[in-house]
């Protein structure tokens, strides 16, 4: 599965990156998602969402490690770079939303509170 995630990450914007680094990030993203899967759910059961979510995680981590988080625009003529906090949803957030139906509920839960 890591190879499929690696190929997808390269196609989505990771091409030209150090292959060893990208492969390491993809393997770590796969492990992170697998740890959060609901009991009895395998990556293959996730209807194609798993490879895309893992690739998004790896790319988000790669961007963060390169200081590219929050960059929303880049121009070449008269060089301008725009960085905005909270602009677009991070790829990691999108990955978790995509995998939501397959992941254990680890969020905050009210117990014993009458609705």
Image (spheres, rainbow, N blue to C red):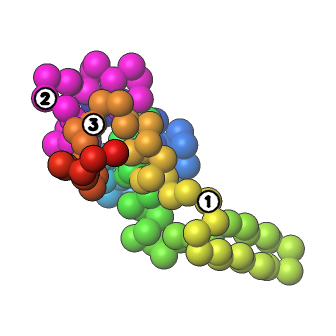
- Residue 15 visible somewhere in the drawing: no
Instruction: Kindly indicate the quadrant of the structure image that contains residue 18.
Output: bottom left
Count of residue discs: 3
Q: Of tags 3 and 1, which is closer to the observer?
A: 3
Location of mark 3 (residue) = 103
User: Residue at 55% across / 49% down in the picture?
Assistant: 13
Q: Nearer the viewer, residue 36 or 23?
A: 36
The CA distance from mark 3 to mark 2 is 9 Å
- Kindly give the residue lying farthest to the front in the view shown: 114
Q: Is residue 57 above or below residue 52?
A: below
Does residue 33 belong to the magenta stretch? yes
Which secondary structure lies at badge 2? loop
- Of the numbered discs 2 and 1, the one sitting upstream in the chain is 2
x and y percent of residue 105 in the render?
Answer: 25, 42
In which quadrant of the rendered image does the C terminus lie?
A: top left
Does residue 84 belong to the magenta stretch? no
Which secondary structure lies at badge 3? loop
- Residue 75 visible somewhere in the drawing: yes
Location of mark 2 (residue) = 39
Label 2 neighbour load within 10 Å: few <14, some 14-19, many 20+: few
- Kindly give the residue lying farthest to the right in the view shown: 77
Q: Nearer the viewer, residue 64 or 8?
A: 64
Location of mark 1 (residue) = 88
3 vs 89, left or right, is left
Which secondary structure lies at badge 1? loop
Magenta region = 32-51
């Amino acid at each position: 599965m890591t190879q499929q995630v690696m190929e997808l990450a390269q196609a989505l914007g990771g091409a030209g990156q150090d292959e060893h680094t990208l492969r390491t990030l993809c393997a770590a993203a796969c492990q992170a998602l697998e740890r959060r899967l609901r009991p009895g759910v395998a990556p293959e059961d996730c209807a194609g969402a798993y490879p895309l979510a893992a690739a998004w995680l790896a790319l988000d981590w790669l961007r963060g490690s390169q200081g590219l988080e929050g960059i929303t625009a880049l121009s070449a003529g008269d060089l301008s770079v725009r960085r905005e906090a909270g602009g677009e949803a991070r790829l990691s957030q999108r990955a978790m939303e995509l995998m939501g139906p397959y992941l254990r509920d680890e969020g905050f839960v009210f117990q014993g509170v009458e609705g």
